[in-house]
Image: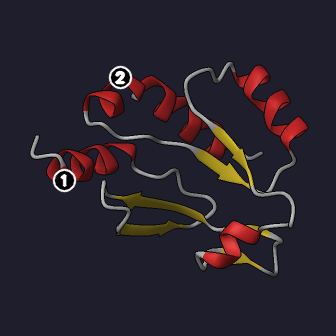
């Protein structure tokens, strides 16, 4: 896992109470197998963020939603916001070297919830 991913998960974990206030769930998903996710969560002390595995069939979810990078064999770094009616209302892709703007997602989620 790169430093950007570590920082992203640390930031989203610290903002968990704000996401809860906005009735927003922020899972992390990538193509790592479950044992790797568990070790990663333990090492980084991630306790409040759900870490989901799209390992097998390899990247199937990422493929279905159009964010699988076949060259790299992983999902693109993407924030996807789904509203309460299960409608995708935001898809924002980031360069692998960039840390996603969590505050942007909080502002967007607040707008959806009228806050």
Tell me the CA gap for discs 2 and 1: 17 Å
- Name the residue: 57% across, 67% down: 95
Q: Quadrant of the N terminus?
A: top right
In the drawing, does residue 85 fall left or right of residue 28?
Answer: left
Percent position (x, y) of residue 71? 82, 81
Which label belongs to residue 65?
Answer: none
Looking at the rendered image, the quarter that the C terminus falls into is top left
> Quadrant location of residue 47?
top right
Please tell me how crowded label 2 is: few (under 14), some (14-19), or many (20+) other residues with Cα within 10 Å. few
Percent x, y of residue 53: 76, 49
Secondary structure beneath dot 1 equals helix
In the image, residue 4 lies at what x, y percent?
A: 62, 46
Q: Which mark is residue 112?
A: 1
Q: Is residue 43 above or below residue 29?
A: above
Question: Which label's residue is closer to the chain start, 2 or 1?
Answer: 2
Q: Is residue 102 above or below residue 40?
A: below
- Residue 105 or 63: which is nearer the viewer? 63
**Badge 1: how crowded within 10 Å, few (<14), some, or many (20+)?**
few
Question: Residue 59, image x and y in percent?
Answer: 78, 67
For residue 17, which numbered disc appears in the image? 2
């Amino acid at each position: 896992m790169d430093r950007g991913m570590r920082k992203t998960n640390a930031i989203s974990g610290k903002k968990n109470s704000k996401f809860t206030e906005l009735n927003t769930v922020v899972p992390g998903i990538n193509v790592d197998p479950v044992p790797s996710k568990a070790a990663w969560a333990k090492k980084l002390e991630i306790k409040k963020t759900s870490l989901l595995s799209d390992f097998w069939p390899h990247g199937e979810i990422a493929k279905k939603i159009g964010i699988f990078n076949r060259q790299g064999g992983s999902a693109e770094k993407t924030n996807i916001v789904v509203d309460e009616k299960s409608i995708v209302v935001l898809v924002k892709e980031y360069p692998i070297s960039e840390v996603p703007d969590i505050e942007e997602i909080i502002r967007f989620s607040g707008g959806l919830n009228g806050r």
